Image (cartoon, helix red, strand yellow):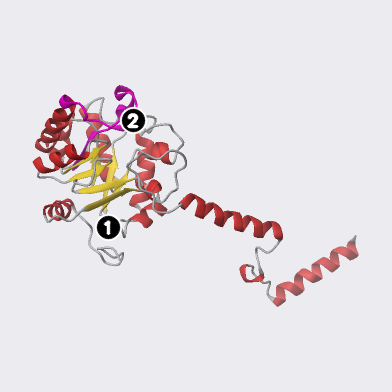
Amino acid sequence: MSHHSTIDAPAITIPHLQQWARDGRRLVMTTAYDAVTARLADPVVDMILVGDSVGNVCLGFDNTLPVSMAMMNHHLEAVARTRPRALLVADMPYLSYHLSLDDTLCNAGGFLQRGAAAVKLEGGEKRAETIRALVECEIPVMGHLGLTPQSVHAMGGFKVQGRAAEDAVQILEDAHRLEEAGCFALVLEGIPSELAARVTEILSIPTIGIGAGPHCSGQVLVLHDVLGLTQGHQPKFVRTYVDGFGVLQQALTHWAEDVRRGVFPSPAESYALPAAAHAAVSAWASDLSTRS
């Protein structure tokens, strides 16, 4: 059983997570994009991320860039309605924190009004001023360094980051600056294991790894990847625990076969007409035949 049950368990807060990380307890985060995935994840994980990965996982886009605030709000609201005990974090999508500080505060504040406990945004030192402004408005911020999907074109694709000496040092510098700016935690994506270990060592806030090796304070994976619901090529860092797509499609196939063979629905899955109504229907039918 998980560390918190679904009955009367207290909500997980940022101070809880930071204390657990200090105590050496590994943190677990996964994505949820609707009420079903939120209910699946909530008894198991410490943090739920309504990720802009909804774009490629659920909405059919090639990357996260087309995801809008309207889309994010729609999916966040669906997750928030389940009132998860896990800390609920919402991803700031592309262009939601790039244009002006007013825009950024309005978008992030809207996430909190819809039930998020924190927001996540991508980028290093150049985001420090934005993060400071958010934190000053009591909006907790999770940072995101390394392979940042919103920068896919600038990076020339989804590639491991921080392999060159200057890039590795820049990630260390950025991590330090993001902590200084007030981030409560930091996602490290697609960077060498040793570099993630060093970042974790120099920070007093938790690090959450995805393709960043085993030495972070915690780990995040897309729920659909863990459950084997996504099709096609999987990144090296994904471990799939069940062929969810195959299992679910097989169940659907069995149902379709039962329908075609006429064995679904059975009497047990059907409603009987009460005797009085049955008599009235029979009388109406016989009356109709005499009329015609």
Does residue 283 show up? yes
Decide which of 256, 99 is in the foreground and name it. Answer: 256
User: Regarding mark 2 in the picture, which secondary structure is present there?
Assistant: loop
Kindly identify which residue carries mark 2.
Answer: 158
Q: Is residue 160 above or below residue 290?
A: above
Decide which of 32, 98 is in the foreground and name it. Answer: 32
Q: Which mark is residue 171?
A: none
Residue kind at label 1, given as amino acid type: Arg
Q: Position of residue 57 (x, y in %)?
A: 42, 40
Residue kind at label 2, given as amino acid type: Phe
Residues drawn in magenta:
140-166
Mark 1 Cα shell of 10 Å, populated few (<14), some (14-19), many (≥20): many
Residue 73 magenta-highlighted:
no
Q: Identify the image quadrant of residue 285.
A: bottom right
Camera-near label (2 vs 1) is 2
Mark 2 Cα shell of 10 Å, populated few (<14), some (14-19), many (≥20): some
Q: Identify the image quadrant of residue 261.
A: bottom right
Q: Position of residue 50 (x, y in %)?
A: 33, 44
Name the residue rendered at 16%, 42% in the picture: 197
Q: Is residue 8 above or below residue 161?
A: below
Kindly identify which residue carries mark 1.
Answer: 85
